[in-house]
Image: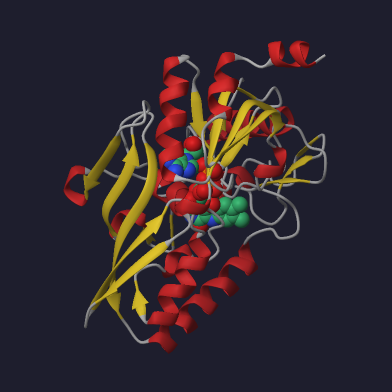
């Protein structure tokens, strides 16, 4: 019996199981790790709690030629119903730390990639350092926010990043200074396969009470315009130059449109909500339909903002 069980474990699984600070799950359903609560199983789901474990796991994946992708807090992804072939990596404990260096008129904070953006925004406001307020209400990790160049209300990660540390796909260490990085709208243009492990940001000294008031104001603004109560992935499409994807989808008559348990939010045309049990195929059908209608009515090609993960 034991021999039969051992035989079922792949050589890669055996290698990964020996790495300290790494938890391996096989055929792990991904819906629970995404804010939209959608997604089939990952062949390998790797929870990486220690920095050395990341390098060792990447080396093993590379040697076994098994592809991988990163999952932060899963707040801007659409994971296929068929799931992900290969490995999904999620960063844990060692990547949830922040080190502050405060000076008279500014601060540098080095933050692990798994740190929650909203937690960082509030910590910065409490300490009286500004620049991160735009991140209030962005339910992602610092690594995901950097990768996506997340932004809102006229600011984005690009404006505060000083340095990025990461790993190459084969497990080597890599670092980029601000000057070595090129950001664009919802993209960081990192070399393919780069894993962000830490981000250093530069913040400016400001009045703590004013910052907290600003953060509260942005919470209210979000609540008044975005759907609450149903799982979603934030904006599904990037805003085209000079316009808004939500406005175009509404004008095309697709606001409120439903496929299965997925619906284009009645509150905001660029959000799709999951009423419970929606599939990735339902969401994709709504996105394709809205995109075609906007293209035929207004000649505008909407580009997805969510990242499609897995086997489509
Ligand atoms: C209610 C709601 C509101 C939102 N509002 C905003 C907003 O105002 N502005 C905005 O920009 N976004 C917004 N988003 C989208 C999302 O929160 C951001 O894009 C966020 O930064 C994604 O971070 P994440 O950790 O969830 O990344 P994930 O969704 O897990 O991943 C997104 C992409 O980043 C990659 N990735 C994640 N972590 C790493 C890493 N460590 N290294 C390399 N690649 C990585 C993934 O592979 C994937 O391609 C919103 C989402 C929701 C649900």
Residue in the image at 49% along x and 76% along y? 215
Query: Quick one: quadrant of the C terminus?
Result: top right
- Nearest the camera: 267 or 140? 140
x, y percentage for residue 45?
A: 61, 32
Residue drawn at (43%, 28%) of the image: 58
Q: Residue furthest left?
A: 179
- Rendered location of residue 4, percent (x, y): 77, 11
Residue 241 visible within the image: no
Instruction: Decide which of 44, 242 is in the foreground and name it.
Output: 44
Q: Quadrant of the N terminus?
A: top right
- Quadrant assignment, res 194: top left
Residue 262 pos. (x, y %): 76, 40
Q: In the displayed structure, does residue 191 sit left or right of residue 150?
A: left
On the rendered structure, is 99 left or right of 9? left
Residue for point 74% across, 46% down: 256
| Image height of 230 relative to 258, above or below | below
**Residue 310 in sight here:** yes
Q: Position of residue 190 (x, y in %)?
A: 32, 36
């Amino acid at each position: 019996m034991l021999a039969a069980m051992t035989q079922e474990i792949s050589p890669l699984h055996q290698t990964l199981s020996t790495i300290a600070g790494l938890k391996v799950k096989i055929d792990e359903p991904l819906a629970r790790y995404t804010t939209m609560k959608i997604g089939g199983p990952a062949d390998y789901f790797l929870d990486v709690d220690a920095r050395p474990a990341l390098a060792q796991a990447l080396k093993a994946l590379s040697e076994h030629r098994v592809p991988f992708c990163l999952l932060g807090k899963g707040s801007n992804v659409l994971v296929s119903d068929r799931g992900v072939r290969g490995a999904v990596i999620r960063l844990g404990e060692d990547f949830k730390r922040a080190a502050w260096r405060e000076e008279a008129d500014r601060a540098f904070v080095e933050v692990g990639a798994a740190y929650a953006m909203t937690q960082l925004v509030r910590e910065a406001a409490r300490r009286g350092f500004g620049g991160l307020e735009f991140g209030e209400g962005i339910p992602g990790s610092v690594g995901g926010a950097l990768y996506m160049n997340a932004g809102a209300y006229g600011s984005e990660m690009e404006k505060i990043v000083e340095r990025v540390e990461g790993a190459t796909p084969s497990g080597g260490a890599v670092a980029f200074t601000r000057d070595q990085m090129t950001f664009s709208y919802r993209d960081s243009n990192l070399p393919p396969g780069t894993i962000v492990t830490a981000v250093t940001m530069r913040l400016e000294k400001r009045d703590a009470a004013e910052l907290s008031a600003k953060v509260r104001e942005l919470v209210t603004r979000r609540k008044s315009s975005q759907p609450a109560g149903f799982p979603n992935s934030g904006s599904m499409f990037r805003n085209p130059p000079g316009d808004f994807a939500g406005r175009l989808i509404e004008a095309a008559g697709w606001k409120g449109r439903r496929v299965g348990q997925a619906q284009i939010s009645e509150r905001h045309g660029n959000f799709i909500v999951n009423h419970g049990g929606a599939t990735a195929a339902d969401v994709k059908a709504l996105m394709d339909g809205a995109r075609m209608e906007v293209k035929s009515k207004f000649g505008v090609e909407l580009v997805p903002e969510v990242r499609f993960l897995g086997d489509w």
